Amino acid sequence: MKKLTKRLLTLGLLAAVPALAESWQTDIQKEHRALSKVYVENARMCTIIQSKIIKYKSDMRDDELAQATLKNYERQIKQYCDPILESQK
């Protein structure tokens, strides 16, 4: 009886290992796809913010609110463009 139980447990474990490996591989693929989407979105936002800064600087007023807006755009550049530049190193 003990041998039968051990064999059944062993068979159960052997059957579960490939399923777990497949599950881990699927999780890794999902994570890779999610990171790829984030990279694409960061690249898109980086391009948009860069063009906004160029346009904003050409039409910018000379007051505190305009300076604050420009600082915010520069903060967004760091947020979206820096991860892209770091990943290209």
Image: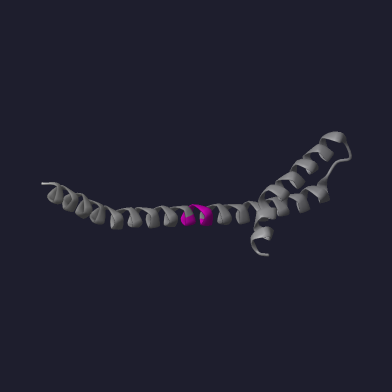
Q: Is residue 84 above or below residue 5?
A: below
Is the residue 57 above or below the residue 65 in the image? below
Please tell me whether the stretch drawn in magenta is mainly helix, strand or loop.
Answer: helix
Please give left or right for residue 25 compared with residue 35 in the image. left
**At 69% from the left edge and 50% from the top edge, which residue is drawn?**
49
Q: Percent x, y for residue 22?
A: 33, 57
Q: Is residue 19 left or right of residue 42?
A: left
Q: Position of residue 52 (x, y in %)?
A: 72, 50
Count all numbered tags in the image, as a single digit: 0
Give residue 55's position: percent from left, percent from top: 76, 51
Task: Residue at 17%, 51% (x, y): give it.
Answer: 8
Which residue is located at x 20 percent, y 54 percent? 11
The part of the chain drawn in magenta is: 32-36
Q: Nearer the viewer, residue 45 or 89?
A: 89
What residue do we see at 22% from left, 53% from top? 10
Q: Position of residue 26 (x, y in %)?
A: 38, 55
Q: Residue furthest right?
A: 62
Q: Is residue 25 magenta?
A: no
Front position in the image: 35 or 45: 35
